[in-house]
Image (cartoon, helix red, strand yellow):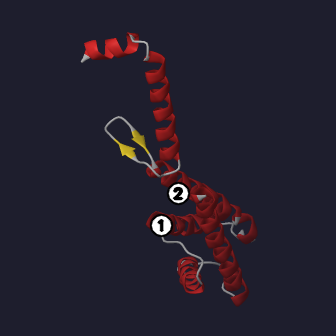
Amino acid sequence: MWETISNVLTSANASMVMASLLILVVIISVLSRRGILSINTKGLTLGADVQERDIIRQQIEWSHTYIAGLYSYIQPMTDNRYQGYFTKFILEMVFAEVVNWISFNHIKIDSDYISVKQATIKYIVFSYDIDPIFRTTKFEKQIDVWVEELIKKLCTIREVYNK
């Protein structure tokens, strides 16, 4: 086998063989990056799995930043007991639920889907002993707006990466 390889590399066609191999490697890498070709071995993983991980990573990073940013909107004025950590805890519970949505990978922009997820988040928030100022229909509507915006952005992230 080594003798054959040596003969090919020292022949007059060596540059043509090397150029062909280089072109083949470039084509394989381009196809694997676009998710068309997937190669999975013990030491090498190329293909659609990498793209899917990128999508999930971006969705999780964005949703964590978005949900953590909501703290400034809903920070209770009289939270002397926990110094704001109770609110952060509730936001982390909401984030954990959103990570479940991302993990199951079935997020869609559908009014029924969005309404179910809005109800889920409201149930999570209202299952805790929150201040009465947050137990209003105005705050419920604000949660609905935030959840709808979150779902739409998660779908947009997936669409951007699938192009």
Q: Residue at x 47, y 67 (%)?
A: 105
- Residue type pointed to by label 2: Ile
Quarter of the image where the N terminus is located: top left
> Which of marks 2 and 1 precedes in the sequence?
2
Q: Please, which residue is most extreme toward the front here?
A: 12
Q: Residue at x 50, y 32 (%)?
A: 23
Q: Please, which residue is most extreme toward the left here?
A: 1
- Residue 155: image quadrant is bottom right
**Front-most of residues 93 and 81:** 93
Question: Badge 1 is on which residue?
Answer: 105
- Residue 10: image quadrant is top left
Residue 10 lies left or right of residue 140; in this view the side is left
Question: Badge 2 is on which residue?
Answer: 56
Q: Position of residue 36 (x, y in %)?
A: 47, 52
Q: Position of residue 146 (x, y in %)?
A: 68, 74
* Mark pair 1, 2: CA separation: 9 Å
- Residue 139: image quadrant is bottom right
Category of crowding for the residue at label 2, using alpha-carbon neighbours closer than 10 angstroms: few (below 14), some (14–19), many (at least 20): some
**Front-most of residues 34 and 82:** 34
Q: Residue at x 56, y 77 (%)?
A: 121
Circle 2 sits in a helix, a strand or a loop, which is it?
helix
Q: Residue at x 70, y 65 (%)?
A: 71
